[in-house]
Image: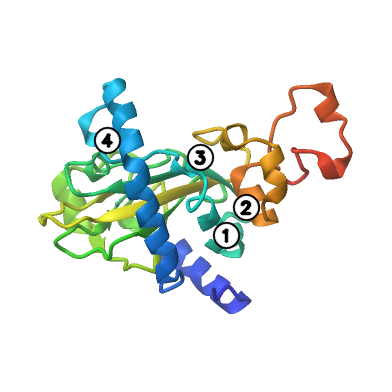
């Protein structure tokens, strides 16, 4: 992955100007195939849970926090350009959410929305990394992002939004990064083809994640993880709940300095 200083500055510039960019061809096909196969395998588990809980129809096929099922979702974190994320945030970051879904029906991400309402921080409150598991086409639905230069806190009406937002068509192997503050949505899929995507959101560590990944995955487990994955899962930004944890030697602590 090309994340040398020149490239980091280039992407940061693009992000500062537009609030999004596509990192082209940065993931190998086999990684994408593993994610897609894993999603198809786990989807029935979510279907059962959604039916039991009467979860709404627009969420069909959405596997929230799928990373708690481990491989290959967990392994995928190893392929993320962490240096680039750290650069865009101006400091360390953690995973806030990790979903895989199929835009093959009226899924709720088709509604114009923001992932975060915070706009006044000196860094993005939330970054969305969208990984297409199928190449997006105009017919299966691109990702529409409202121009940063025209952003307003009030949601634009459909007509204004679709006049200004151009559909982005990332391909398999690309990652689309965008500022979760920008109004965005998935376009309609007018085919019978799948249009699957993983969306991972990230924040600085002081913003609480949507799911307690460390608790779900366990602490013993974390010793087998790389430093990057440990950081992204939030193992360096825990809150001690016992004095025994608080007073641990610095190296063994699950709360580290600079996690703000
Ligand atoms: O699938 C898309 O194009 C958009 C996804 C989205 O809106 C989101 O992850 O918040």
Mark 1, residue position: 78
Q: In x, y percent, where is residue 248?
A: 86, 34
Cα gap from disc 3 to disc 2, whole angstroms? 13 Å
Q: In x, y percent, where is residue 63?
A: 36, 40
Mark 2, residue position: 229
Q: In x, y percent, where is residue 50?
A: 30, 28
Give me the residue at 75% from left, 38% from top: 255
Residue closer to the observer: 224 or 129: 224
Cα gap from disc 4 to disc 3, whole angstroms? 18 Å
Residue closer to the observer: 242 or 146: 242
Whether residue 12 is visible here, answered yes or no, is yes
Give me the residue at 84% from left, 45% from top: 251
The disc, 4 or 3, on the residue closer to the chain's N-terminal end is 4
The disc, 1 or 2, on the residue closer to the chain's N-terminal end is 1
Cα gap from disc 1 to disc 2, whole angstroms? 6 Å
Cα gap from disc 1 to disc 3, whole angstroms? 15 Å
Crowd band around label 2 with a 10 angstrom C-alpha radius: few (<14), some (14–19), many (20+): many
Mark number, residue 68: 3
The disc, 1 or 3, on the residue closer to the chain's N-terminal end is 3
Mark 4, residue position: 59
Give me the residue at 62% from left, 56% from top: 90
């Amino acid at each position: 992955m090309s994340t040398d200083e020149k490239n980091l500055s280039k992407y940061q510039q693009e992000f500062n100007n537009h609030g999004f960019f596509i990192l082209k061809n940065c993931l190998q096909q086999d990684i994408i195939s593993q994610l897609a196969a894993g999603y198809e395998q786990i989807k029935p588990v979510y279907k059962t849970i959604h039916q039991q809980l009467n979860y709404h129809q627009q969420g069909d096929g959405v596997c929230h926090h799928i990373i708690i099922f481990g491989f290959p979702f967990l392994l995928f974190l190893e392929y993320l350009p962490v240096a680039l994320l750290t650069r865009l945030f101006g400091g360390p970051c953690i995973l806030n959410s990790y979903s895989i879904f199929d835009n093959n029906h009226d899924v709720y991400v088709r509604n114009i929305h923001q992932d975060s309402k915070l706009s006044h921080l000196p860094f993005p409150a939330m970054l969305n990394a969208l990984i297409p598991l199928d190449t997006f086409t105009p017919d299966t639905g691109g990702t529409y992002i409202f121009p940063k230069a025209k952003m307003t806190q009030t949601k634009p009406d459909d007509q204004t939004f679709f006049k200004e937002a151009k559909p982005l068509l990332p391909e398999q192997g690309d990652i689309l990064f965008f500022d979760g503050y920008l109004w965005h949505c998935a376009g309609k899929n007018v085919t019978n083809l799948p249009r699957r995507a993983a969306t991972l959101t990230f924040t600085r560590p002081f913003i609480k994640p949507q799911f307690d990944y460390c608790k779900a995955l366990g602490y013993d487990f974390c010793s087998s993880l790389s430093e990057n994955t440990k950081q992204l899962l939030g193992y360096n930004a825990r809150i001690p709940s016992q004095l025994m944890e608080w007073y641990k030697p610095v190296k063994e602590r699950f709360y580290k300095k600079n996690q703000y």
